[in-house]
């Protein structure tokens, strides 16, 4: 799952070296945290949060297929 999220984020941002994607286990499932450069945060979130919602939808679809639950967080 981390590879999928990293691939998507790499296609959106300009500063690929600033991408930091981490994963941690919680009681609700696995939380994936995305951190990018300050200038690229808007590209990852998108207008009205549409890109962020699309990333979360893909994570949900993969989670259903794998029998897991993924939560996506975007931090600045």
Image (tube, rainbow, N blue to C red):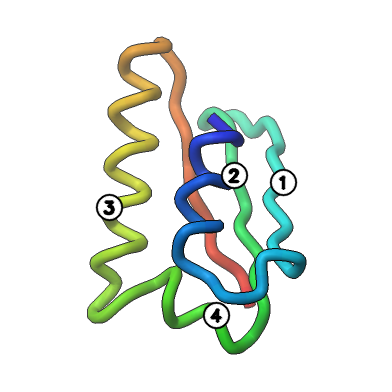
Mark 2 or mark 3, whichever is nearer to me: 3
Secondary structure of residue under mark 4: helix
Q: Regarding mark 2 in the picture, which secondary structure is present there?
A: strand
- The residue lying at 32 percent from left, 75 percent from top is 46
Question: Within the image, what quadrant is residue 65 found in?
Answer: top left
The answer to which of 46 and 24 lies nearer the viewer is: 46
The answer to whether residue 6 is above or below residue 25 is below
Pointers 3 and 1 in contact (CB under 8 A)? no
- Judge from the rendering whether residue 37 lies leftward or rightward of residue 1; answer left or right: right
Distance between the alpha carbons at the discs numbered 3 and 4? 17 Å
- Does the residue at mark 3 contact the one at mark 4 (Cβ under 8 Å)? no
Residue shown at 64%/70% (left/top)? 36
Q: Which residue is mark 2?
A: 32
Which quadrant is home to the C terminus? Answer: bottom right
Q: CA distance from mark 3 to mark 1?
A: 19 Å
Label 1, on which residue?
22
Task: Identify whether 71 is placed above or below 14.
Answer: above
Looking at marks 2 and 1 on the same chain, the residue that comes earlier in the sequence is marked by 1
- On residue 58, the disc is none
Alpha carbon separation for disc pair 1 and 4: 18 Å
> In the image, what residue occupies the spot 71% across and 37% down?
24
Q: From the image, state whether disc 3 or disc 4 is nearer to you.
A: 4
User: Real-space Cα distance between discs 2 and 3?
Assistant: 15 Å
Label 2, residues with CA under 10 Å away: few <14, some 14-19, many ≥20:
some
Q: Position of residue 8 (x, y in %)?
A: 46, 50
Quick check: marks 2 and 1 in contact, CB under 8 Å?
A: yes
Q: Which residue is mark 3?
A: 54
Q: Earlier in the sequence, mark 1 or mark 4?
A: 1
Label 1 SS = strand
The residue carrying mark 4 is: 40
């Amino acid at each position: 799952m981390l590879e999928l999220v990293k691939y998507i984020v790499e296609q959106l941002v300009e500063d690929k070296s600033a991408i930091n994607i981490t994963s941690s286990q919680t009681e609700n499932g696995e939380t994936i945290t995305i951190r990018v450069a300050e200038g690229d945060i808007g590209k990852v979130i998108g207008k009205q949060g549409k890109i962020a919602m699309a990333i979360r939808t893909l994570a949900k679809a993969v989670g259903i297929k794998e029998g897991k639950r993924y939560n996506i967080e975007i931090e600045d």
